[in-house]
């Protein structure tokens, strides 16, 4: 095709902003989508604590996901229970992690989608691997995929239960969907790079 765009595929793997711009253009995540997400802040903001609670209720239902909260978390300085059976909502380390997820949702609705935000989305992906988080904690990719699927579903419920008119609701659902697909890619890329590094060693 005469108007076919040229993409530097090697740069996609090393330049986070270039990668984000490609994904955003390909998926159709525009400034209007970012505005729709930010406009939903008055509806999402008060619901964030409940959203976080629902997310962690699900994470603590399974030993495969709950076990990651036993070792000391990256940046956490308090005491740890050291026992999977004792992990619950009263655990100070769980509260520490819940506060991080709370701040994540605040970032999504409160920041401009500029280069700093791209770096933040990329770090969210990297911090869940041993390359940036705790060396003792390596979360399997399937669990991160499950988490993003859960967050997407919970957000959809909030949007669909909101008082927005039909057209605004549709735009908001689509905007968050596009954003979470981009976030999922910024998670997956660090796992793929890790596997390639292991295979090469």
Image (spheres, helix red, strand yellow):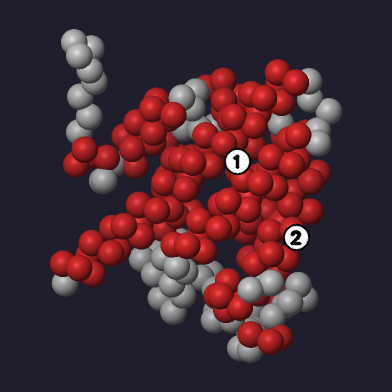
In the picture, the disc for residue 92 is none
Q: Is residue 170 above or below residue 92?
A: above
Q: Please report whichever mark, 2 or 1, sits nearer to the chain's N-terminal start.
A: 2
Q: Residue furthest right?
A: 163
Badge 1 marks a residue whose secondary structure is helix
In the picture, the disc for residue 108 is 1
Considering depth in this image, is 42 or 139 the residue closer to the camera?
Answer: 139
In the picture, measured across the screen, residue 194 lies left or right of residue 98, that is left
- Residue 103 lies, in percent from the top left, at 64, 51
Considering depth in this image, is 160 or 137 the residue closer to the camera?
Answer: 160
Determine which quarter of the picture holds residue 23. top left
State the residue position of label 2.
53
In the picture, measured across the screen, residue 55 lies left or right of residue 32, that is right
- Residue 99 lies, in percent from the top left, at 68, 60
Q: Is residue 60 above or below residue 16?
A: below
- The nearer-to-camera label among 2 and 1 is 2
* Residue 57 visible somewhere in the drawing: yes
- Residue 144 lies, in percent from the top left, at 51, 59
Q: How many marks?
A: 2
**Residue at image location 20% in from the left, 24% down from the top:** 6
Mark 2 crowdedness (10 Å alpha carbons): few <14, some 14-19, many ≥20: some
* Residue 110 visible somewhere in the drawing: no
Determine which quarter of the picture holds residue 25. top left
Mark 1 crowdedness (10 Å alpha carbons): few <14, some 14-19, many ≥20: some
- Residue 50 lies, in percent from the top left, at 79, 53
**Residue at image location 44% in from the left, 79% down from the top:** 136
**Residue at image location 20% in from the left, 33% down from the top:** 8
In the picture, measured across the screen, residue 134 lies left or right of residue 61, that is left
């Amino acid at each position: 095709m005469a108007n076919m765009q040229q993409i530097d595929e090697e740069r996609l793997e090393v330049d986070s902003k270039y990668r984000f711009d490609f994904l955003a253009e390909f998926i159709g995540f525009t400034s209007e989508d970012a505005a729709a997400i930010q406009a939903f802040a008055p509806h999402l903001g008060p619901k964030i604590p409940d959203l976080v609670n629902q997310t962690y209720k699900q994470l603590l239902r399974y030993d495969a996901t709950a076990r990651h909260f036993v070792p000391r978390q990256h940046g956490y300085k308090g005491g740890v229970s050291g026992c999977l059976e004792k992990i619950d909502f009263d655990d100070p380390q769980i509260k520490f992690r819940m506060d991080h997820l709370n701040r994540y949702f605040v970032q999504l609705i409160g920041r401009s989608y500029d280069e700093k935000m791209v770096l933040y989305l990329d770090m969210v992906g990297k911090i869940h691997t041993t390359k940036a988080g705790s060396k003792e904690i390596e979360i399997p990719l399937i669990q991160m995929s499950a988490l993003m699927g859960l967050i997407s579903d919970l957000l959809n419920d909030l949007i669909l239960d909101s008082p927005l008119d039909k057209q605004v609701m549709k735009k908001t659902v689509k905007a968050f969907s596009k954003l979470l697909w981009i976030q999922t890619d910024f998670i997956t890329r660090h796992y793929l790079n890790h596997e390639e590094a292991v295979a090469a060693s």
